[in-house]
Amino acid sequence: MNVGTWALAVLMVITGGYAVTRHAIAAVTALEKDVIAAINSLRNIKDAARGTAGTEPTGRPPAAGPTVGQVAAQELNTAPPADPPEERPPATGARDVSLRAEVPAQASAAASKPLAGIQHEPPSASTVEDDHAWDVFISYASEDKEAVARPLAEALRSRGVEVWLDELVLRIGDSLRRKIDYGLARSTFGVVVLSKPFFAKGWAQYELDGIVTQSVAGSQRLLPIWHEISKEEVARKSPSLVDKIARDTSTHSIEEIAEEIAALIDSIGTG
């Protein structure tokens, strides 16, 4: 191989190496730019996330934003107009003094006012009880009124017996509870018409409780009347009433029961 050939070969090697080197340098330079751009992007995202202030890491000052004074001025300009203050007449010194003097005077007058001066409405005439007493108080269920309670009351009254029966005593506007209590407290005998409906009635049970209480205290005597109910049924409802001597409408008529009660009342001198 001659010298010219070697020289050409060496030149080709050098030229190829230079091209490769140039391409390598260009690739590194492009990669460096990409890395720098990525780093700057990450820094910007980080700064935006934590709201950093001051100068940026690159040494360049951040973009100037509105100052606190500018924000306050903007809020004042955009805020809705406030309502005008309410116009009030100026207070005079003499009026203030008079108001302060009136409050203690009123409080003193209220404290010194006697209770007797408080007005109240008197109770109606229907709630004022008279000094009346009865020989017999009849307690019953409404289902037994026509068959037992009303005929018994009429038979007793025909024999001169004072009878407390709701339809004979109660008037419009009366207090049912008060009238019942008053009748129970001022009756010598408590006649109770025991039946299946009787044990299912609230007011009937209320009256029975009062009669039993009076009987236990000795101020009243209980006279049971059984109507369409057996001894076993009474025992299941109220065992304490079974031992009381009773009259049964299935074996005694209303007239017979009334006659016996009237005779009992006459025997103790309550007529």
Image (cartoon, rainbow, N blue to C red):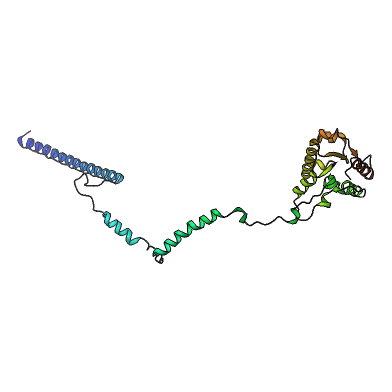
Question: Which residue is depicted at the point 27% across and 54% down?
Answer: 68
The location of residue 206, given as percent across then percent down, is 77, 42
Residue 245 x, y percent position in the rendering: 88, 35
Residue 90 vertical placement versus 189 (above, below)? below
Q: How many marks?
A: 0
Q: In the image shown, does 103 or 30 lie closer to the viewer?
A: 103
Relative image position of residue 82 (x, y in whole percent) = 38, 62
Taking the image as shown, residue 221 lies to the left or right of residue 58, namely: right
Q: Quadrant of the N terminus?
A: top left
Q: Quadrant of the C terminus?
A: top right
Front residue of 250 and 62: 250
Q: Using the image as rendered, state which of residue 150 and residue 120 is in the foreground.
A: 120
> Residue 24 lies in what quarter of the image?
top left
Q: Position of residue 48 (x, y in %)?
A: 29, 46
Residues 85 and 177: in front is: 177
- Kindly indicate the quadrant of the structure image that contains residue 40: top left
For image coordinates 32% across by 62% down, the residue present is: 77
